[in-house]
Image (spheres, grey):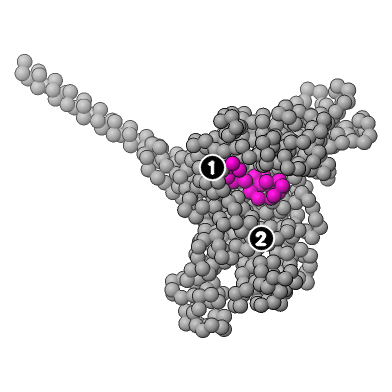
Amino acid sequence: MVEMMVAMALVLLMMVMFAEIFTLATGSMSKQKSLSELDQRQRTVSTILRNDLQDRTFFNLTPFHKANSALSLTDPNFINPALRSGYFYISENDLDNDVDDVLQFTVLRKVGKLFYGRTKELLANGPPSGTIQNPNQPESDDGMFANGIPGAQNNNAGASPEAEIAYFVRNGILYRRILLIRNPLGSVEQPMSTPIGGMMPIPSFRMFRPGIYPGSYVNGGTNFLNDFDYSATYDFASKQIELLAHSRLANTSSFDPFALGLSNNRFGFNPLSGNPLEYMISSVPGDPLNFLGRFTHEETSHIQFGWPGDPGPNQGPDGAFLTMDDTFGSGSDTNPYTRPNLALSPDGVVINTTTGNPAYQGGPRQGEDMLLTNVIGFDIKVWDPRGGPGRDGQPGIAGVNDDGANGVDDPFGELGSPNSDDGAFVDIGNNGRFGFYSQSNNWNANFGPRGPANNRCFDTWQPNKGGLAPFVYHPGIDQQPGVANVDDDGDGTIDNAPELGWGGSDDIPIPQLKAIQIRVRYRDITSNLVREFTVVEQLTTQTNLSNTN
């Protein structure tokens, strides 16, 4: 009897041991599986970031200056405009907050590769049932358009090699928002209503004129950004939606009111002021609890998100915008980029402060722009040749008077000298004294989302955009904009910001932005461990520029 009890005890002990071993083995396998999945996600995000950066349209990242407006080949500041199309934008925001950086730029995919997005067939207003529609519309941009063919159906998809792309973090989620820049099969970029064979009365009209077609794009009937994944704005003059197409990437001396280089035309920027909307208007500028980044796909697909089809108050009977007056920013304003009664809840939901209810929560396209979850850091830094001394610990080449002034190894004139080992990755608008991208060199602190005291943005600007790019020129040895002690522009003020880069001065252009570093940190829920990966991308390599019609 005793022997049987001992044997049973031994058997039970062995079973417990095997169960423990099995638990440990399965736990280890689950952990390894989780780590493998995280590695795959990490590689995916890293690859997407690299590919987007390599495919940017603005290759030579030297911001435009007012001296470039003529784009003359005899201008010493001239740089091939084909390498400076579209835009490239970075916002640092709070230096001590690693989840409020924003990266946004235009992209041209390599030959044979396309972006795809949702579209909706545009039906001409008034023709008999079955009339063949004009194929010049986003639905046909992917080469697949039913167009009255018996039994054929549209796929509600458009395609383009070009797009606006925005990266930002909100509520622990890294978003990648894509809006196609239209590249039609034909030469006419705006969809028109005249069907094939002239079956519509003349004159034809824009298919995106609110109140005519589609009239439901105003007053909460439906939502343009739910139906179309295309970059667009509202034309206040002609009172219609303007699709931003391939030609809008050009940065030339000819003024184009819809050029994407002009910030008021970009996704996520105020269409009136041109400043980025990265914090809710009702909040104190820079309040981290109200950091928006950009509107998400969930929000822009919500039925009440009117832009760009419903630009705001004061609309006529056909839904067309009539006047631009003080109703913008007032209690009656319904434009999501200017209305003052929006804020963020603690869980990152845009709410209406008047009612306390969510404003755009529950849009049908929720989650389509999510890239990575449980993100606790998205930190962007740029390479600054004057960001710090190199291994020799001295500005410029150690022991050499690189600039021929102020003695050997002086930090102001020699830091970042050619052939030195100087340089470091730094935040845009950092508090350093001498760097090209230190806040002391921000010559347009009015541009940005947080107010003049805290705006820290890099922007490539546009030849016809007024004012200066934030980081465009650096004062020379005299440390004054323009010629020191001279009123270069004759405005009555000596050595003020508009004189920066003036002809005959010793001012130095900010050098081409040559590299970017993006550090992403996220938490693995399974192991509760923080993981990190870093993308460092050289920004001086030219890629294919010919993937357009």
Amino acid type indicated by mark 2: Ala
The boundaries of the magenta stretch are 264-282
Q: Would you name the residue on which mark 2 appears?
A: 469
What label does residue 290 carry, if any? 1
Q: Is residue 227 above or below residue 12?
A: below
Task: Residue at the far left: name it.
Answer: 2
For the point 50% across and 78% down, which residue is it?
Answer: 410
For the point 75% across and 54% down, which residue is it?
Answer: 250
Q: Main secondary structure of the magenta part?
A: loop
Residue 474, given in percent of the width and then of the height, sits at: 61, 69
Residue 76, given in percent of the width and then of the height, sits at: 73, 72
Depth order, front residue of 199/273 = 273
Dot 2 falls on a residue whose secondary structure is loop
Depth order, front residue of 402/140 = 402
Q: Is residue 216 above or below residue 176?
A: above
Category of crowding for the residue at label 1, using alpha-carbon neighbours closer than 10 angstroms: few (below 14), some (14–19), many (at least 20): many
Left or right: 246, with 496 as reference point:
right
Amino acid type indicated by mark 1: Asn
Q: CA distance from mark 2 to mark 1?
A: 26 Å
